[in-house]
Amino acid sequence: MASVGWKRQYETETLYRFAMMMKIVAARKPEDAEAAAFARKTRLVATMQISQEEIDLKSGDPARDRFNDCAVCKKQNGDRCYRDFNEKKDCIYERADVKLRVIMKHFGEEAKRWIEEAGKIAEAELEAKA
């Protein structure tokens, strides 16, 4: 049985948000078959992750798994929860570097290219609005 704690929750959320970002990138570049294919791949991976998490939630113990995730975090941070000493009070599994590692784990180096492309699209849209 897989863990259904904080780490898993934020990993699933990260994959979902990445898939939604890729949907936007593909929509802004309708002529780019590669973007459309990668967007489909991200949507499939996110859907599989969400489905597996739903199955695991029915048979797992989220409270225990979240407690265990917090214990791992406290062990890494000198017996203090990351939320205790970070101003925004985010969980350590919400940090941008952790989210990037999740994306890289599932999609490899190709993901970096699409993240950069999404950034360019966002910048261009902001400039167009200004």
Image: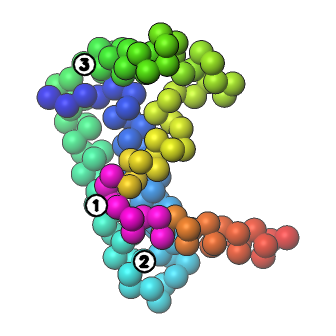
Say which quarter of the image contains residue 35: bottom left
Q: CA distance from mark 1 to mark 3?
A: 26 Å
Callout 1 secondary element: helix
Residue 46 visible in image: no
Q: Residue placed at 34% from the left, 34% from the top?
A: 8
Q: Nearer the viewer, mark 2 or mark 1?
A: 2
Residue 117, numbered circle: none
The residue at which mark 3 appears reads as: 61
Tell me where residue 34 appears, x and y as whole percent: 38, 81
Magenta stretch, residue numbers: 105-113
The residue at which mark 2 appears reads as: 35
- As for residue 7 lying within the magenta part, the answer is no
- Disc nearer the start of the sequence (1/3): 1
Q: Residue placed at 49% from the left, 13% from the top?
A: 78
The residue at which mark 1 appears reads as: 44
Q: How many marks?
A: 3
